[in-house]
Amino acid sequence: MDIKRRDFLKVVAGGGLLLATGEPAFARAPKTLPPNALGILYDATICIGCKACQSACKQYNNMPPDHTYRPPELTDQIWDNPVDLSAKTLNIIKAYKSGTGATKNREVDGFSFIKRHCMHCIDPACVSACPVSALQKNPDNGIVSYNKNACIGCRYCQIACPFNIPKFEFDKPFPQIRKCQLCSHRIEKGEISACCEFCPTGASIFGKVTDLIEEAKRRLQLKPCTYYKYPVSTVTSSYKLLQPVDKYQEHIYGEKEGGGTQYILLAGVPFDKLGLPVLPELSDANRSETIQHTIYYGLIAPVMFLAGLLYAVHRNAKNEDDNN
Amino acid sequence: MRSVDGLDIAKNLEKQGVSRRDFLKFCTVMATAMGLPLGMGAKIAEAVTTLKRPPVLWLSAQECTGCTETLLRSSHPTLEKLILELISLDYHETLNAGSGHQAEESRLKSMRENKGKYILVVDGSIPVKDGGIYCKIGGKTALSLLEEMASQAAAVIAIGSCASWGGMPSSSPNPTGATSAQEVLKMKAIKTPVVNIPGCPPNQYNFLSTVLYFLTLKRLPELDENGRPKFAYGRLIHENCERRPHFDAGRFAMEFGDDGHRKGYCLYKLGCKGPETYNNCPAQLFGDVGAGAWPVGTGHPCFGCSEKGVGFTIPLHSPARLKFITPPANFPGIAEERGKGVTVAAVAVVAGVAGAALGAAAVTAKNLGKKDEGQADTETKER
Amino acid sequence: MTESKPLGGKIITLPFLVCSFIAAIAGFLLIKRFIFGLGSVTNLSDGYPWGIWIAYDVVVGTAFACGGYAMALLVYVFNKGEYHQLVRPALLASMFGYTLAGVSIFFDVGRYWQAYNLILPRYSQLYSVMFEVALCVTTYIIVLWIEFTPTFLKKFNKETLRRRLNRTLFIFIALGVLLPTMHQSSLGLLVYIAGQKVSPLWQTGFILLLFLISAITMGFSIVIFESIVSARALKREMEIPVLSKLAGYIPPLLGIYLAVRFWDLVGREKLGLAFTGDLKANMFIIENLLYIIPTILLLSPSKRSNPRWLFVSAVSMLLAGAVYRFNVFLIGFDPGPGWQYFPSFSEVVITLGLISIEIIGYMIFVKRLPVLPSLSQA
């Protein structure tokens, strides 16, 4: 019996070591961009904050108004005025402001808009977290969609998402999760996401992620105070608007963050100031699944452990039963 | 100008003091109202002057004559004369020269001669309850008259809310079974196309534009799912309202005559139905007297008279249901306060429970200590 | 081995009535939750989608209910027959703890009417930690009831059936060790996917091991705690010699725990965060002090056999485990600037109601079923 205890402790210690090394044998390869990944490029420097995208999103996704933002200077609020993304708001324009807030796209004494919605991660934490496959990533276009018929409402996706995107209807007796699904119902009909279609300046453009990243890289090469023909609605659109170029942050948000996202952003203000988290390149989903996989790979370890337990308990419980 | 059927419209017009220039101007205005390109003005002029005056029959059912009245008040070059002589108004209860059998004869004669070519204008709702006995003309029910006249018409234009969707007479409890022309035709399986020009009264120019469109292009204007011409009913009143900026900024008149009301703030909270009523009132205006000549312009909330399920249905001062979500004038910051925080009751309960638990644990520990010596003694003794 | 007997006595007592009253209020609030949605009774938000119903009722609740697991591990795996008298009461507490955790998950999930999707193969998502935890906990609840069935059978004199069940019981006992090993560790892994939303003071790959060890120590502590409290409450003699021997296992376990905890923090260079003076740092210090105190106390054999110090250590360890779990799931969890959460009054009352039901059930069971060892043996 003493031998057995020692063996058991060995197993425990071994498991601990396995975790300790951080380079387990079953480490999962990072996921790559789906072949026809669709996405959105948002350029905060040319966003005018008109919220056309926000209202188009409401209209084409049949979302109700939301009156959660109540700044003190507005005593009487009725119109759609959400404070953040919610189960009623899948797309929102927020504003960053510092100091006097005089100049657009400046970190100090400036302001900037930021458009927030689902990032459609290449390796989404919500999909990895969901126990019932209610959230799924389309293997072809990479859209992360939600199936309410599968969902049990555990809200683990909300815990998991680094961007706090999935939203839950806490005010309903039969609630569901709500999130941007990149207007997949419109894409099916050959249309594009409503937010991009209705953006008047080309701040949000729709297209293949590879094209969008190319376009983003092109914009980072531009010199401030020159002019550039910004495509409107889609990245390949022939309708372009000649607009002055502002100074960009030398960073394409979403190219690498959390394993990469299909919603990528450019801005004149550092992204963490705009409320976007600073994330490592390895996704949380990857790290979590690696540990989960190491322990439960093919259920080998649990089954072996169970076999040992069965042997021990059978032997030890027998004398007990006789005594009892 | 050419003369057709021995009738020289141009000469006729000049006799009545309408110059050719004025006439063309009118035609261009109508073209604009219909959303047609400017060049269409000349085409309209051609259409109304070269053709035989198209016959129009006007059937009045359960109505208040408001629609006729509004039409009479058109003031572009003496419009009632212009139109009533441009078209051949063969039957109209209010405007008929003759009366009784004479009038009925004129109707029948026109129907015989212009079978399949005349335009039927319906004004007022059709009572269908009890066989339609609640409205009779010349001994015939409005129901049978409509059936008879609509089946032979080129098109039916339902003018006013009553004819378009039932209007005021159809409000609950609807004692006469008031029904719209469209519904009656559907009931009787009559295929004649129907154009609805709802409103109480409707804007006369929406009606005139529809008639002229039909005359000019030989087809009906583009209609929405409710049979309304899109050029007039394509947008919500809310979308074109001059008070809209106040709405977006959250500035509202709270009661009639208050400060906000006097400053011209949005009337949404007084029950304005603009956000759910499709009409061009803020753009077209009424009475040809210039800006502000429409209900909201004068400081009264829109009543939704032209919208089925709104006017005569929803109480005047209850707020409208918003059809579209459009942006406000302010922006939430990056990190606003969200979620629900501490309340006194919750803290009290948590603190109470935690305190009680820790207290009980402490007391237990203390008592255990007291007993401890004695118990330890007894234990050792036992052993 | 010891003989177990029902205690007997009145069911309806003052504590019974108080607990019933709290449970009744909780029941009313639960009706409200099912009619008007979670938001009507809880302070949950999109930033803090999990509140005390998960952090306390499920995570801390099941850890408190690890008595059965810890004792089974000791008695049946390491063959320490001398603790056998402690198994059955521990098993009963585990059964209640886990069952109520299961019930409270049912209150907490939003789309409870399709919770069975978890067991439909076409929906199962094997990569999900939640999937493993949910299935494991559900199975373990069933296993616990089966493990406890002989006691029912004894009560109702179904001897043949009991013997037959006893022959296969070892399978369930083995499962009863395997399943908690799996899910008590995975409960910690649940937050691993939340990445940066959990403070580095708690977010680590070792969270599996830390949760597992602390769950086992909490199991031992709850056995000591329950034994002392029920001895006092039911005016029975204490089982001090057995308990103090049991307590001897705790310091080495906690030693391993603390070593891993701090070695990991130092290795990741995050220990400095513990001294920033904010809420998270202070809670970290409290949590670890509560762990260090019993480790030191129980190292001394004289203190180990003193009921007072035994009790203090047990309470301290239970608190430590609870604070650790609260820290991981609520205090260390930060969805971003601006978000706040504190349980609402109703939320707390519902949790209290569940605890009340647990106490009522435990009292009825020990009075009517042969759970506690008979007095002559004590």
Image (cartoon, rainbow, N blue to C red):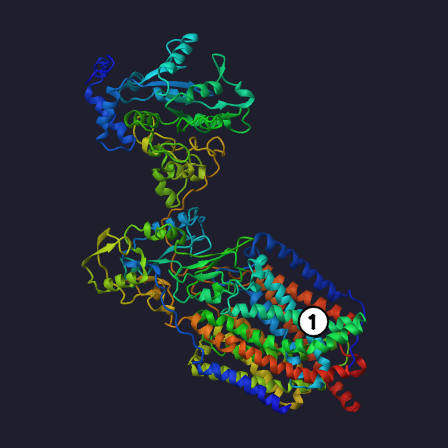
Q: Residue at x 66, y 80 (%)?
A: C71
Q: Position of residue B211 (x, y in %)?
A: 33, 25
- Residue C364 point in image, percent of width and height: 75, 68
Q: Amino acid at mark 1?
A: Ile
Q: Quadrant of the C terminus of chain C?
A: bottom right
**Left or right side of C129 for C161:** right
Residue B296 image-quadrant placement? top left
Residue B192 at least partly seen: yes
Q: Can you say which quadrant of the picture contains the N terminus of chain C?
A: bottom right
Is residue A99 positioned above or below C219 on the image?
above
Residue C241 percent location from the top left of the image: 71, 87
Residue C162 x, y percent position in the rendering = 76, 74
Residue drawn at (61%, 88%) of the image: A5
Above or below for B16 versus A38: above
Could you tell me which secondary element the residue under label 1 belongs to? helix
Q: Residues within 10 Å of mark 1 (few under 14, many from 20)?
A: some
**Figure quadrant of residue C68:** bottom right
Q: Residue at x 59, y 57 (%)?
A: C113
Q: Nearer the viewer, residue A226 or C295?
A: A226
| Camera-side residue of B120 and C268 | B120
* Vertical arrangement, residue A280 with respect to residue A91, above or below: below
Residue tagged 1? C146
Q: Between A323 and B299, which is closer to the camera in this rendering?
A: A323
